[in-house]
Image (spheres, rainbow, N blue to C red):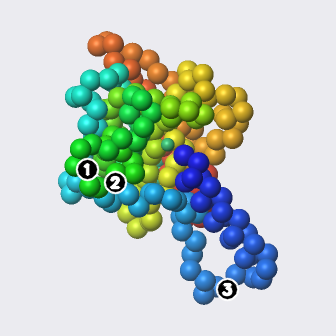
Amino acid sequence: MNRQKFITSLMLGLAGLAASAKKVSSLAPSPEVGGGCDGCNLIYEGMPSNLSNKAYLPGWTAGGKKLIVEGTVYRKDGHTVAANVILYIYHTDSKGYYSASPGQVNGKRHGHLRGWLKTGCDGKYTFYTTMPAPYPERNNPAHIHPVIKEPGINEYYIDEFQFDNDPLLTDSLRSKTENRGGSGIIKLSKNASGILVCKRDIILGLNVPYYR
Ligand SMILES: [Fe+2]
């Protein structure tokens, strides 16, 4: 989402200007991991107190084209599995809107198709949802927003899940991806039940500004 990225670009630009104006004082606060994020704090609105490494989003049982996404979360070294990492995901409905459900109070800006999970000691995760649609203007590929919350680090976003077979995902857009956490472009296949499945491993901190 471009507003989110805009804020990050702005923060990074301001940080660069400040650094070039004068040496950053050693007393200055450390920049936020990820360089800022508009809306990532909504991860906390309505977050269940107990999380497992599986999340079922509300669309899973409400019709629509089912989608299962799974993978493993690794530390920045790329091979040590990462436990206790919260992954928050949200996406548009089948018409391309972040539609709130009747009476929804928490996180309305992200719509009702939201979910949370937390990796266990093997770093694995799975979420069960439905295929998002592109925004109605069809000016952006279909996508699922992921936000990461690790112990001791502020929440930050990584590259959106996008679909390799999406005609809106042009070569130009592919070349502009930041690969935060690794590539978010996923290839769909079908399992034995005919449900769309895909896999994405996540490397914490990879291409994430100010990661420490
Ligand atoms: Fe979006």
Q: Secondary structure at mark 3?
A: loop
Coordinates of residue 83 in the picture (x, y in percent): 35, 52
Per the model, the C-alpha gap separating discs 3 and 2 is 37 Å
Q: Nearer the viewer, mark 3 or mark 1?
A: 1
Coordinates of residue 123 in the picture (x, y in percent): 36, 45
- Asked whether mark 3 lies closer than 8 Å to ligand 1, one says no
Q: Is residue 19 above or below residue 55?
A: below
Question: Is 159 displayed left or right of 123 in the figure?
Answer: right
Residue marked by disc 3: 25
Q: Is residue 43 above or below residue 93?
A: below
Residue marked by disc 1: 104
Q: Is residue 211 visible?
A: no
Question: Is 85 displayed left or right of 25 in the figure?
Answer: left
Amino acid type shown at disc 3 = Ser
Q: Are marks 2 and 1 in contact (CB under 8 Å)?
A: yes
Location of residue 141 (image quadrant): top right
Per the model, the C-alpha gap separating discs 2 and 1 is 8 Å
Amino acid type shown at disc 1 = Gln
Location of the C terminus by quadrant is bottom right
Amino acid type shown at disc 2 = Gly
Q: Is residue 197 above or below residue 212?
A: above
Residue marked by disc 2: 107
